[in-house]
Image: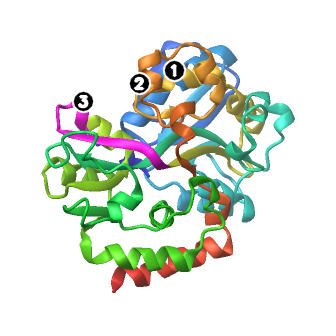
Amino acid sequence: MAERYGKTRLAGTAAALSMALIGSMPAFAEEILFVSQGGAYQKAQTVAILDPAAKKLGITINQDSVPDAWPIMRSQVATGKPTWDVVDVATNFCLRGGEQGIVEKLDFSKIPNAAAMPADYRSDYSVAYEFYSSVLGYSLKKFPDAASAPKTWADFWDVKKFPGRRSLRNHPLATLEAALMADGVAPDKLYPLDVERAFKKLEEIKPHITVWWTSGAQSAQLLNDGEVDMVMAWNGRISALAKEGAKVAYTYNQGILQSTSLCVLKGAPNLPTAIKFLNEAVDPVHQANLPLHIDYGPANPKAYDTKVIPEARVKELPSAPDNAKVQALMSYAWWTSAAGEAAEKRWLSFAQK
């Protein structure tokens, strides 16, 4: 997931940016080791959330950055002496961690900020931390005005009305949801996914897919270079291109709203402090600070009530109320179920044909 956030990564344990924090502040008795995904994203959350939370709670937040935290989460817990406390990771890994005894079950009476969030944004083992969307992006050179641009996944599938080269992600998450919406399923009626129907619809579009992309950088490059005219991509990738002057655009209509979440490793060495931090990390004001530094939306809806985010910026964010209501909220509970795991396995054979 780290490549969604940008090209640069933070390297090594207790990344340099947290070391600067430690060096500039007195040593506190309480500390945690926070693990995220590096790059521009971790830099943004450090400024927006981690530094203010550390100051407010009077704790030290050491950091690590790992592109793929899941296998390390498993191995750390298996040793019986984990060193990580709080992990920012794709929500499905928090849920799987709960099922497998790898992350702590949360007591929301101790996390009031999270308890006040919508039930769909949290689970017994996770709290949503930030939102991004899989959206339909397109070239303004090919589709120069609103009247000509594709607006729905049905448009993406309509190769006669909307001719052009297309690209989809080589992964079932969000792609199956897009296929079902293309087949007429309403965004709020997707789950449980009709897997047979989704793959049947994907077979229709498969001959017209120029590239099945495997990284966020690739999806953006394909659109920027004119290799494709429309693409499913993460909203931040396309908005970054647009800010650089590329003739590209996207729509949140029928986007798939996805999240990363915070979870606490089972047997975390600083468990009480980790729980205090979890509550602070989803504080509305801290959450509202995040989109001031990167193109992803706060997970706590109350962030939009703080007036910290300028109105023009609100309109750009995936989790903003007006944008969220036209999208499908991904069900990570379904994707971590037996049916979801079977759909992931089936994707492998679909992709290889």
In-front residue for pair 221/77: 221
Look at the numbered discs 3 and 2 and tell me whether their residues touch, using CB distance below 8 Å.
Answer: no
Seen in the picture, residue 27 relative to 118 is either above or below; the reply is above
Whether residue 18 is visible here, answered yes or no, is: no
Reading the image, the residue beneath label 3 is: 243
Reading the image, the residue beneath label 1 is: 289
Seen in the picture, residue 132 relative to 113 is either above or below; the reply is below
Query: As drawn, is 135 to the left or to the right of 49?
Result: left
Of the two numbered discs 1 and 3 in the rendering, the one whose residue sits closer to the viewer? 3
Residue span colored magenta = 241-255
Q: Secondary structure at mark 3?
A: helix
Q: Secondary structure at mark 2?
A: loop
Q: CA distance from mark 3 to mark 2?
A: 14 Å
Total marks shown come to: 3
Residue 104 placed where, x, y %? 76, 50
Instruction: Tell me which numbered mark, 3 or 2, is placed earlier along the sequence.
Output: 3
The picture quadrant where one finds residue 8 is: top left
Whether residue 343 is visible here, answered yes or no, is: yes
Query: As drawn, is 294 to the left or to the right of 260?
Result: left
Residue 141 placed where, x, y %? 14, 44
- Is residue 254 part of the magenta span, yes or no? yes
Query: As drawn, is 188 to the left or to the right of 148?
Result: right
Residue 307 placed where, x, y %? 56, 13
Find residue 293 and name its label.
Answer: 2
Residue 102 placed where, x, y %? 70, 58
Instruction: Tell me which numbered mark, 1 or 3, is placed earlier along the sequence.
Output: 3
Density class for disc 1 (Cα within 10 Å; few <14, some 14-19, many ≥20) is many
Q: Amino acid at mark 1?
A: Asn
Look at the numbered discs 2 and 1 and tell me whether their residues touch, using CB distance below 8 Å.
Answer: yes
